[in-house]
Amino acid sequence: MRTYKVEVGNVTRELPVVEVAPGVSVALFNMLGDTEVTEAAGRALAGLLPPDIDVLVTPEVKALSLAHVISRETGKPYIVIRKTEKPYMVDPIAREVVSITTGKPQLLVLDGFDVGKVRGKRVAIVDDVVSSGGTLHSLRQIIEEVGGEVAAVVAVFTEGQERPDVTALGHLPLFQ
């Protein structure tokens, strides 16, 4: 299998290159279960956050452990935007997005209970990889709709096109 070598802090990984659409492959970065990479990335990104951030917002699942490490390192709370609406949610705010890795529409949902934690706050969006920007766009819409200000976007990697709006530890190419 073809791989692509990356470094996250002092940690090196060989990422498998996998096809996500006909003729388009990516170096698949998955932190889930990789404590060493998650800790290294979280510490590095915590050091790059602007000091006036009030709260972190992250999409469910793959970046959740990263947000936890950044929260621990900075003392900033984090909120998880879920990918499904749950029956216990009160007045949820939802947006649909198509991610390059899923290839099909999915929901991003902010529980109404968390709106007050975002309203009037300077927010840093935390994600593992920002590629097409679809998830980022939907997260930004939700945050701004409830009165939060997106003051920073941090990710372990950007992918594909350059993303000057994202503070990242590295960049992953798309493979044709």
Image (cartoon, rainbow, N blue to C red):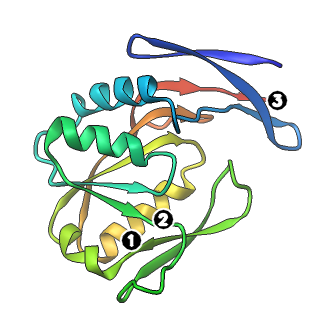
Q: Secondary structure at mark 1?
A: helix
Residue at image point 52% right, 43% down:
130
17 above or below 113? above
User: What secondary structure is marked by label 3?
Assistant: loop
Residue at 35% x, 28% y is 39
Within 10 Å of disc 2 (Cα), the crowding (few <14, some 14-19, many 20+) is some
Q: Which residue is mark 2?
A: 138
- Closer to the chain start, of discs 3 and 2, is 2
Disc 1 crowd, CA 10 A, few/some/many (<14, 14-19, 20+): many
Residue 114: image quadrant is bottom left
For residue 176, the mark is: 3
Above or below 11: residue 166: below
Q: Residue at x 60, y 48 (%)?
A: 132
C-alpha distance separating marks 1 and 3: 33 Å
Percent position (x, y) of residue 60?
Answer: 47, 57
Q: CA distance from mark 1 to mark 2?
A: 6 Å
C-beta proximity under 8 Å, tags 1 and 2? yes
* Disc sitting over residue 170 in the figure: none
Question: Which residue extends farthest right?
Answer: 22
Q: Amino acid at mark 3?
A: Gln
Looking at the picture, does residue 60 appear above or below residue 22?
below
Q: Earlier in the sequence, mark 1 or mark 3?
A: 1
SS of the residue at dot 2? helix
Please report the residue visible at 33 percent of the width from the left and 67 percent of the height from the top.
143
Q: Residue 11's spot in the image, x, y percent? A: 45, 13
Give the Cα distance between marks 3 and 2.
27 Å
* Marking on residue 142: 1
For badge 1, the amino acid type reads Ile
* 92 on left or right of 108: left
Give neighbour class at mark 3: few <14, some 14-19, many 20+ (Cα, 10 Å): few
* Residue type of the residue flagged with mark 2: Ser
Q: Nearer the viewer, residue 140 or 62?
A: 62
